[in-house]
Image (cartoon, rainbow, N blue to C red):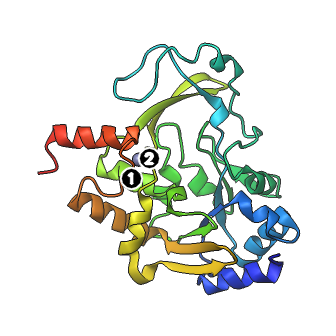
């Protein structure tokens, strides 16, 4: 079993400094590997990092409309029954993504606030100004706000596909993203720039060189990488090769649709 001090040491080994804000992605698989579970994990995190963000995604707010834009990988009209069970987003709505347990624990900590994107909200401690920059119109506004501020991305037993911030680089590159819809207290809201497939994000690590810190913690690898270098590297890769960071699954509908758009636009040269 991992103990509090093991997590503190891991954060030290990853060169995380207390004053550097961090965007933290923690696998729920750690819960069973750490003595004291979520409380120990969060206690160690907050003892080592003053200001942090963590996802608090709520996919059960999503609804499927009757009509919408083409090439969006949604079967319009197919949600007539499921839409009735969709939740209305509010700041109290529990997260329902795969790693929700630790995020939910964090949500109830004192002084933790939440952004109000109905699907892709984040929790934050000491980063209210960043959180306020995320909106339905700009789902990556908080990440953009944090550029140039010495922010680290921390992956605790998570792989590169969980790096939400990379979807900002994708958006900046002009690559196609998707439109989804979610229930809010103001009714159904259209959520643009919804992320595409992240399964090819691991290809980024090869280009990060010594900017990427990684350590083995029991069976898993933990990573830390600077937000600025991560975004700059991704933007450079996509500029050089419009197909960069797409996944290798030949059946991946999202990546295949993006390849088709790149071919049609002729931007692949
Ligand atoms: Zn893919």
| Drawn side of residue 12 relative to residue 179, left or right | right
Dot 1, how many residues are within 10 Å of its Cα: few (below 14), some (14-19), or many (20+)?
some
Residue indicated by mark 2: 197
**From this viewpoint, is residue 183 visible?**
yes
Residue 176: quadrant of the picture: top left
Judge from the rendering whether residue 206 lies leftward or rightward of residue 3; answer left or right. left
Residue 223 image offset from top left, x and y in percent: 56, 73
Residue at the extreme left of the image, as rendered: 269
Left or right, 191 with respect to 17, comes to: left
Return the residue nearer the eye: 178 or 34: 34
**On screen, residue 91 above or below 216:** above
- Is label 1's Cβ within 8 Å of ligand 1? yes
| Figure check: 160 above or below 35 | above
Q: Is mark 2 within 8 Å of ligand 1?
A: yes
Residue 150 in view, yes or no: no
Question: Could you give the CA–CA distance between mark 1 and mark 2, rounded to whole angstroms?
Answer: 7 Å
Please state the horizontal and vertical placement of residue 71, each as a whole percent of the image.
Answer: 34, 28
The quarter of the picture where the N terminus appears is: bottom right
- For numbered disc 1, what is the local secondary structure? loop
The answer to whether mark 1 and mark 2 are in CB contact below 8 A is yes
Q: Looking at this view, is 192 or 98 the one in front?
A: 98
The residue to which callout 1 is attached is: 247
Q: Residue at x 65, y 20 (%)?
A: 82
The residue lying at 35 percent from left, 68 percent from top is 233
SS under mark 2: loop
Front tag of 1 and 2: 1
Rendered image: mark on residue 113: none
Q: Residue farthest to the right?
A: 36
Residue drawn where x is 62% and y is 82% of the image:
17
Residue at image point 47% right, 43% down? 138
Q: Could you classify mark 2 by the number of other residues whose Cα lies within 10 Å: few (under 14), some (14-19), or many (20 or more)?
A: some
């Amino acid at each position: 079993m991992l103990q509090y001090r093991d997590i503190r040491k891991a954060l030290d080994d990853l060169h995380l400094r207390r004053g550097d804000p961090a965007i933290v992605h923690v696998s729920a698989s750690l819960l069973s590997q750490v003595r004291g579970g979520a409380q120990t994990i969060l206690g160690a995190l907050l003892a080592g990092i003053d200001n942090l963000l963590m996802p608090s995604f709520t996919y059960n707010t999503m609804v499927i409309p009757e009509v919408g834009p083409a090439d969006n990988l949604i079967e319009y009209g197919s949600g007539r029954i499921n839409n009735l069970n969709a939740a209305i987003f509010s700041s109290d709505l529990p997260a329902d993504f795969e790693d929700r347990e630790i995020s939910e624990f964090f949500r109830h900590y004192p002084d933790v606030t939440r952004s109000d994107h109905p699907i892709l909200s984040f929790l934050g401690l000491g980063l209210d100004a960043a959180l306020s920059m995320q909106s339905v119109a700009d789902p990556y506004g908080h990440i953009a706000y944090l550029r140039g501020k010495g922010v680290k991305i921390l992956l605790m037993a998570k792989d590169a596909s969980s790096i939400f911030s990379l979807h900002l680089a994708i958006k900046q590159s002009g690559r196609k993203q998707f439109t989804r819809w979610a229930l809010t207290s103001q009714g159904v809201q259209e959520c643009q720039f919804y992320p595409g497939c992240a399964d090819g994000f691991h290809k980024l690590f090869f280009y990060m060189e010594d900017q990427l810190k990684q350590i083995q913690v029991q069976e898993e690898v933990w990573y830390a990488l600077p937000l600025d270098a991560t975004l700059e590297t991704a933007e450079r890769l996509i500029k050089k090769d419009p197909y960069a960071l797409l996944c290798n699954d030949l059946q991946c509908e999202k990546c295949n649709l993006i390849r088709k758009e790149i071919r049609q636009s002729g931007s692949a040269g």
